[in-house]
């Protein structure tokens, strides 16, 4: 028995000596029959601010703990499990400051007949680690508070487009907690088609590294209503430049969108007033612009143009003949063939309309669309004789819509020619006068409508 005790003691003190050289804090504390430190190395004394380990020998083990509850818990764990690893707690230094430590210790019984109880263990000073941890936790909390107080939906996704962090605004939009949302994708919240578009945008950002900024979308909410939002998505990379995921910010602009729609309604109402003036002055011109607008919109939709571009095209169609207000009625409504001078006066309506609109600002080339709608790809149109790529796409669509309507409706100088002749005109001159791709689109639409002019009401006169 004595030999075993000596070996154990020799082993502990051998480790004790090595720990001193490495700056590791070791201690041996006797629990019974008298509680006292039997061995403390200088490293522990340094952590606790004592000049020598002898000062610590005078202390009780429990007194080192700032929180007596931690001391009781540690001793209970040690008694039950015999070994405790990396137990984090706060010790009090000599001058009453806090020192975070991690204790790894074992519960030891002596090998002699007295059966004394000991604690043998080591401590690690983790104060700096805890300070960094608290700083990080503070920064995390500050960041989350910032996110939660933003009036926008903010969300982070991993490389599989799964949500890994969201702010309160995002979660409240689905009546869920942020924790309930984590791990889900847009397919859990939005209709399949809409979620797929969002998924594709995320994938684009991940694969290209390019952001998507200020994309305007309409989303279906859980309550069945739609809202209008603007979304920005950016890539997130680690310090090595490797893609980690995406961050998105979505702002609800429904109120702004409704205000813009109200303004647009006012503009469209103004156009209707102008149309009414045209109708009173020239019934043919009024109906013509409305029908051209219907045709142009249908073509643009088939070509996949965005909503705003289509709206601009429709407005161009509604206004493209407004310059005829300045043309004398006796020329405008003259039956029979026009003289060369009269025809030139008619042609002037294009420039007159352009001059009226040009001083005003438009997000799309509305004035230029009107200015060019009588130009032809072969350069034989008017008023400037533009050709080929100099004619913008909007004007090419408007030109075809204008010709199609004009040939299928009555004019003062002739009867309607009918849709078959109009179609033949487009076919014969596709690629020379008219854009070949746009001609294909309108012919497809006409065919799908069984060669019935969808732009003419039943009570309007036309020749099929």
Image (cartoon, grey):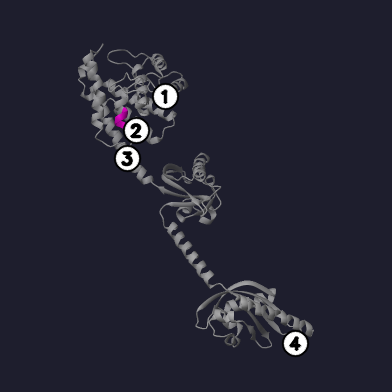
Q: Position of residue 54 (x, y in %)?
A: 59, 87
Which one is earlier in the sequence, the residue at label 2 or at label 1? 2
* Picture quarter with the C terminus: top left
- Label 1 secondary element: helix
Residue at mark 3: 262
Residue at mark 1: 438
Mark 3 or 2: in front is 2
Q: Position of residue 409 (x, y in %)?
A: 34, 17
Image-based side of 24 in relation to 332, left or right:
right
- Residue 332 visible (yes or no): no
Mark 3 or 1: in front is 1
Residue at mark 4: 114
Which one is earlier in the sequence, the residue at label 1 or at label 4? 4
Image-based side of 70 in relation to 201, left or right:
right
Q: Quadrant of residue 265?
A: top left
Which one is earlier in the sequence, the residue at label 4 or at label 3? 4
Q: Position of residue 74 (x, y in %)?
A: 62, 76
- Label 3 secondary element: helix
Determine the CA span between mark 4 and mark 3: 94 Å
Residue at mark 2: 312
- Label 2 CA crowd tier, 10 Å (few <14, some 14–19, many 20+): some
- Label 2 secondary element: helix
- Label 3 CA crowd tier, 10 Å (few <14, some 14–19, many 20+): few
In terms of secondary structure, what is the magenta stretch mainly? helix
Q: Which mark is residue 75?
A: none
Mark 4 or 2: in front is 4
Determine the CA span between mark 3 and mark 2: 16 Å
Q: Residue at (36%, 46%) from the top-left corner?
A: 255
User: Magenta residues, as a range?
Assistant: 364-369
The answer to the question of whether label 3 and label 2 lie on touching residues, with beta carbons closer than 8 A, is no
Q: Is residue 335 magenta?
A: no
Q: Quadrant of residue 56?
A: bottom right
């Amino acid at each position: 028995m004595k030999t075993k005790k000596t070996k154990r003691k020799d082993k502990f003190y051998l480790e004790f000596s090595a720990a001193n050289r490495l700056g590791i804090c070791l201690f041996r504390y006797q629990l019974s029959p008298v509680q006292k430190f039997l061995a403390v190395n200088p490293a522990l004394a340094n952590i606790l601010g004592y000049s020598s380990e002898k000062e610590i020998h005078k202390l009780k083990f429990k007194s080192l703990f700032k929180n007596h509850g931690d001391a009781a818990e540690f001793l209970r764990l040690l008694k039950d499990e015999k070994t405790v690893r990396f137990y984090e707690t706060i010790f009090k230094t000599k001058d009453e400051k806090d020192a975070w430590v991690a204790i790894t210790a074992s519960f030891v019984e002596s090998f002699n007949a007295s059966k004394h109880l000991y604690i043998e263990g080591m401590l690690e000073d983790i104060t700096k680690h805890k300070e960094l941890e608290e700083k990080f936790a503070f920064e995390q909390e500050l960041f989350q508070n910032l996110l939660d107080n933003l009036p926008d939906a903010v969300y982070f996704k991993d490389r599989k487009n799964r949500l890994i962090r969201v702010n309160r605004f995002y979660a409240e939009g689905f009546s869920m907690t942020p924790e309930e949302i984590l791990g889900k994708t847009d397919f859990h919240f939005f209709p399949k088609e809409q979620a797929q578009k969002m998924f594709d945008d995320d994938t684009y950002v991940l694969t290209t590294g390019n952001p998507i900024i200020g994309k305007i979308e309409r989303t279906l909410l859980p309550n069945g209503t739609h809202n209008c939002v603007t979304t920005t998505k950016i890539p997130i990379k680690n310090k090595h430049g490797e893609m980690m995921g995406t961050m998105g910010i979505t702002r609800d602009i429904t109120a702004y969108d409704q205000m813009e729609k109200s303004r647009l309604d006012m503009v469209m109402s103004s156009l209707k007033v102008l149309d009414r003036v045209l109708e009173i002055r020239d019934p043919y011109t009024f109906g013509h612009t409305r029908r051209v607008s219907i045709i142009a919109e249908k073509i643009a939709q088939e070509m996949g143009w965005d909503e705003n571009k289509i709206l601009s095209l429709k407005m161009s169609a509604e206004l493209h003949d407004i310059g005829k207000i300045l043309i004398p009625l006796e020329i405008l409504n003259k039956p029979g063939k026009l003289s060369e001078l009269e025809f030139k006066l008619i042609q002037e309506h294009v420039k007159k309309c352009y001059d009226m609109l040009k001083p005003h600002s438009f997000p799309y080339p509305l004035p230029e669309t009107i200015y060019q709608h009588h130009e032809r790809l072969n350069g034989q149109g008017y008023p400037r004789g533009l050709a080929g790529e100099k004619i913008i796409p909007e004007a090419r669509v408007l030109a075809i819509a204008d010709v199609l309507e004009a040939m299928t409706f009555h004019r003062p100088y002739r009867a309607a020619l009918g849709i078959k002749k109009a179609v033949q005109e487009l076919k014969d001159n596709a690629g020379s006068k008219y854009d070949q791709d746009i001609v294909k689109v309108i012919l497809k639409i006409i065919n799908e409508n069984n060669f019935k002019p969808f732009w003419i009401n039943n009570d309007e006169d036309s020749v099929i």
